[in-house]
């Protein structure tokens, strides 16, 4: 029998693998980024609603918390729109490698968010990440739009991660996920309604698209969101941080296996991606050591 810690460690790797597969699904689904996010958020919110109803989890929240969740839902929607947009205009490899900058943006935003001083080595790591981005930007002008969209998505991802970091202390992950996904879907609904985005063609999807969207919404969104928070109760934040950094690795390997040469990049791209990934890992190691010293 596996211990709880070991079982949750394997579960964490499964979740990170699922997150890496999300980008592949985004490429496989033929519809544009905006309707894709609408379907993803709407169906994922419905899945979590059913889960909460079966588990009899209460929906009640204070007005202030609900307002924060609604705003966070808008950030999540923009995060996914830019993420899938990057995949559509570039490819999975470019989007995931650039998304690795999310931890860098988080380290910049944390001092503002929590009111602490900027740490010297974080500034140095930030400059190294910029060097990695320089290599990635040299892959070719045809990928520039995708890189910029992925950078925007990484920044937005860091923002809503910080928001959820506070909310998770007092609220269940399913409640947070439900209200954020529902409000994000409503924001996209309003935009599509005002821009006449809804049409007969909007709802006439290929069978394969329906299948991929269902997997994306149920497994890669609803399940992964709730499971990832539960894992954090048994696995240290440091282990979670290092393991999540494997997401672009899993995603790029999956994309190359499925899409072949369309995901093949030049040597500079992989050097840049490796620089960013190693910097994020080094940042996590130093943070863990500093935390251990403070505890000791």
Image (cartoon, helix red, strand yellow):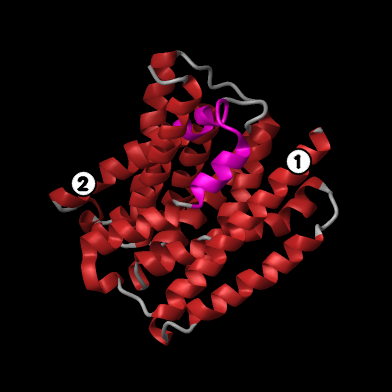
x and y, in percent, of residue 174 in the image: 49, 28
**Quarter holding residue 31:** bottom left
Please indicate whether residue 216 sits to the left or right of residue 76 in the image: left
Q: Residues within 10 Å of mark 1 (few under 14, many from 20)?
A: few
**Image position of 12 with respect to 148: above or below:** above
Labelled disc at residue 210 = 2
x and y, in percent, of residue 51 in the image: 39, 23
Please indicate whether residue 10 sits to the left or right of residue 175 in the image: left
Does residue 12 show up magenta in the picture?
Answer: no
Query: Which label lies toward us, 1 or 2?
Result: 1
Picture residue at 44% right of the left edge, 60% below the top: 83
**Quarter holding residue 134:** bottom right
Please indicate whether residue 135 sits to the left or right of residue 28 in the image: right
Per the image, label 1 sits on a secondary structure element best described as helix
Does residue 241 show up magenta in the picture?
Answer: yes
Q: Quadrant of the C terminus?
A: top right
Residue 243 or residue 230, whichever sits in front:
243
Q: Residues within 10 Å of mark 2 (few under 14, many from 20)?
A: some
Residues in magenta? 226-245
Is residue 194 visible from the viewing direction of this image? no
**Image position of 178 with respect to 127: above or below:** above
x and y, in percent, of residue 222 in the image: 40, 35
Residue 289 or residue 135, whichever sits in front:
289
Q: Which residue is mark 1?
A: 291
Residue 267 or residue 209, whichever sits in front:
267
Is residue 108 visible from the viewing direction of this image? yes
Q: Quadrant of the N terminus?
A: top left
């Amino acid at each position: 029998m596996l211990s709880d810690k070991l079982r949750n460690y394997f579960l964490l790797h499964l979740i990170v693998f699922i997150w890496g597969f999300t980008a592949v699904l985004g490429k496989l689904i033929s519809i544009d980024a905006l309707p894709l996010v609408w379907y993803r958020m709407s169906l994922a919110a419905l899945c979590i609603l059913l889960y909460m109803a079966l588990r009899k989890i209460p929906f009640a929240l204070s007005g202030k918390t609900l307002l924060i969740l609604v705003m966070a839902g808008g950030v999540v929607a923009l995060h996914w729109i830019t993420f899938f947009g990057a995949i559509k205009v570039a490819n999975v490899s470019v989007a995931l490698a650039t998304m690795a900058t999310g931890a860098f943006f988080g380290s910049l935003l944390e001092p503002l968010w929590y009111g602490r001083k900027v740490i010297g080595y974080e500034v140095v790591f930030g400059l190294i990440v910029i060097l990695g981005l320089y290599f990635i930007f040299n892959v070719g002008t045809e990928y520039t739009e995708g890189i910029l969209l992925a950078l925007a998505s990484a920044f937005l991802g860091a923002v809503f991660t910080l928001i959820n970091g506070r909310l998770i202390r007092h609220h269940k992950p399913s409640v947070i996920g439900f209200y954020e996904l529902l409000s994000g879907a409503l924001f996209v609904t309003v935009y599509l309604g005002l821009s006449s985005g809804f049409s007969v063609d909007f709802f006439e999807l290929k069978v394969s698209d329906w299948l991929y969207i269902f997997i994306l919404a149920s497994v890669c969104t609803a399940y992964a969101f709730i499971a990832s928070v539960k894992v954090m109760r048994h696995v240290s934040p440091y282990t979670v941080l290092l393991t999540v950094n494997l997401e672009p690795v899993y995603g790029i390997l999956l994309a190359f296996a499925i899409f072949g040469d369309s995901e093949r990049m030049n040597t500079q791209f992989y050097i840049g991606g490796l620089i960013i990934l190693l910097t994020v890992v080094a940042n996590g190691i130093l943070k863990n050591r500093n935390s251990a010293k403070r505890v000791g």
